[in-house]
Amino acid sequence: MPSNQPIVLLREVGGDRYLPIWIGPGEATAIAFAQQGMTPARPLTHDLFKDVLEAVGQELTEVRITDLREGVFYAELVFASGVEVSARPSDAIALALRTGTPIFGSDGVLDDAGIAIPDEQEDEVEKFREFLDQISPEDFGTGSQ
């Protein structure tokens, strides 16, 4: 991105909306490592959290992107025990990728911040990429998570 701030694009399953969430460089690295299957010599914070969950027998069942208020996204970690814990979306996504946990965005968040890009239209995807090159977090009223 021109602002050198990483962005996560979550894609709607069975739909054509994308949810852009600006994140910090540390979280971007953690997400990229998980996407690429890289394991650092020493565990990153998200790796440690995953290991702790396994050690105490707690299963993360879903991650929810629950809200967008004053430009800030909110997320929850939902555990098999029924416990829900508030989290930054970037951390929740990094943990979900490590645990194979599904990520859900609320309809309200997708309605407010989702961008529709039809998959079958390659030129539309290219336009979206060009659009992303020209925008900043302030254009969406969103900031770093």
Image: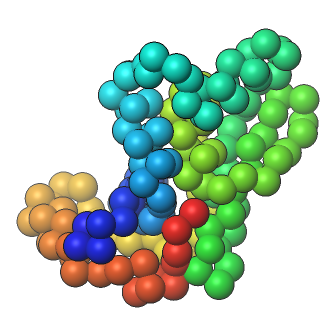
The reply, left or right, for residue 16 in relation to residue 92 is left
Residue 17 to residue 14: above or below: below
The reply, left or right, for residue 64 in relation to residue 129 is right
Q: Please name the colour scheme applied to the rendered image.
A: rainbow
| Of the pair 91 and 115, the residue shown nearer to us | 91
Residue 73 percent coordinates (x, y): 62, 68
| Of the pair 21 and 17, the residue shown nearer to us | 21
Q: How many marks?
A: 0
Residue 24 to residue 1: above or below: above
Dividing the image into 4 quarters, which one contains the N terminus? Answer: bottom left
Residue 78 percent coordinates (x, y): 78, 40
Dividing the image into 4 quarters, which one contains the C terminus? Answer: bottom right
Name the residue: 72% across, 52% down: 87
Residue 107 in sight from this viewpoint? no
Name the residue: 33% across, 28% down: 36
Looking at the image, the residue that sits furthest to the left is: 123
The reply, left or right, for residue 76 in relation to residue 116 is right
Residue 7 percent coordinates (x, y): 38, 60
Residue 96 to residue 14: above or below: above
Residue 1 in sight from this viewpoint? yes
Residue 84 to residue 54: above or below: below
The reply, left or right, for residue 43 in relation to residue 88 is left
Rendered image quadrant of residue 59: top right
Residue 26 percent coordinates (x, y): 47, 48
Name the residue: 18% across, 55% down: 120
Name the residue: 37% across, 38% down: 32
